[in-house]
Amino acid sequence: MSVILQQHARDFGIREMVSVTIIRISPDLSFAKVYLSIFPGDKAEEVLQKVKDKSSQIRGILGNKIGKQVRIVPSLAFYIDDSLDYAERIDNLLKK
């Protein structure tokens, strides 16, 4: 998934740095939750919306890459991973 986003980000109109932090897949492999870390963070919602708008294209590209290996290409849902922001807040609180 990260390779797809790296190679096609410009095609999707994304100029910011997007990293896939974690993917949670259902047991039957039909659904995947993809958590993204976006830098700079102030444009995270805007970039997430662009990715969500292109999710069917991303799923198609994924299907072309793994279609022969799996029976079902999973449906994709994208979320912002704010765990780094949360860890930074905790760290700042502990320093006080």
Image: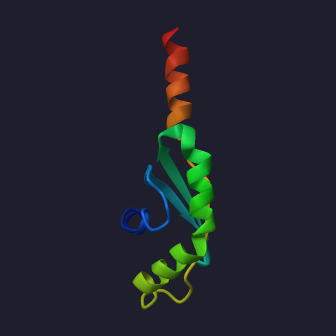
Q: Nearer the viewer, residue 79 or 25?
A: 79
Give the residue at x 56% y 37%: 42
x and y percentages locating residue 39 in the rendered image: 46, 43
Give the residue at x 55% y 82%: 73
Give the residue at x 61% y 78%: 30
In this picture, residue 8 sits left or right of residue 34: left
Q: How many marks?
A: 0
Q: Quadrant of the N terminus?
A: bottom left
Figure coloring: rainbow
Q: Nearer the viewer, residue 74 or 18?
A: 18
x and y percentages locating residue 35 in the rendered image: 54, 55
On the image, which quarter does residue 64 sit in? bottom left
Residue 82 against residue 69 in the figure, above or below:
above
Give the residue at x 42% y 91%: 68
Residue 35 visible in the picture: yes
x and y percentages locating residue 74 in the rendered image: 58, 77
On the image, which quarter does residue 50 sit in? bottom right
Instruction: Specify the farthest residue to the top.
Output: 96
Residue 28 against residue 93 in the figure, above or below:
below
Residue 75 visible in the picture: no
Residue 84 against residue 74 in the figure, above or below:
above
Q: Nearer the viewer, residue 25 or 81?
A: 81
